[in-house]
Amino acid sequence: MCARKTIDSPIMLSFIETIRSAPRAICQSRLLNTADRDLAAVLSATSQENRAYVLELLGTMKSKRVDEELERMRHVRLSPETIDSIALHLQRHIAGDHPLGPASRYFKPAH
């Protein structure tokens, strides 16, 4: 799994709370329709407990793909602001009246 330092910013914690409080069927549907890389970017910067909770909602195949993206995230540098931006987008995706497309991403290889 990813060794990135967890940041659990207020935006990240709000994203996790949205997942925990949303109707399970809607939450699962929206998470399953979320880009694996977007989820991995956000989950790479959250606590193991929060990561496990979200992965449990995804089902076996999606969870496996997100795990693979989490491994790739070890070689990607994302600023806390970028991660927060993706988390906010995903929060709106889950809580909104209709699903949103993928979050805008700017990934840089780690040095």
Image: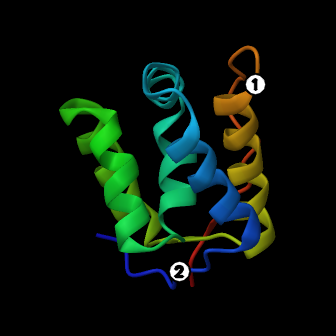
- Relative vertical location of residue 30 with respect to residue 5 in this rendering, above or below: above
Q: Determine which of the numbered discs, if any, sits on residue 6 in the image.
A: 2
Q: Which of 37 and 13 is in front in this view?
A: 13
Amino acid at the residue labelled 2: Thr
The disc at residue 72 is: none
* Closest to the observer, 28 or 63: 28
99 sits left or right of 62 in the view: right
In front of the other: 31 or 110:
31
The answer to the question of whether label 1 and label 2 lie on touching residues, with beta carbons closer than 8 A, is no
Q: Residue 96, how many percent across, how many down?
A: 75, 25
State the scheme by which the image is colored: rainbow
User: Residue at the spot x=74%, y=70% of the render?
Assistant: 10
SS of the residue under disc 1: loop
| Neighbours of disc 2 within 10 Å: few (<14), some (14-19), many (20+) | some
Which residue carries the number 1 mark? Answer: 96
Q: Where is residue 2 in the image (x, y as percent from the top left)?
A: 36, 72
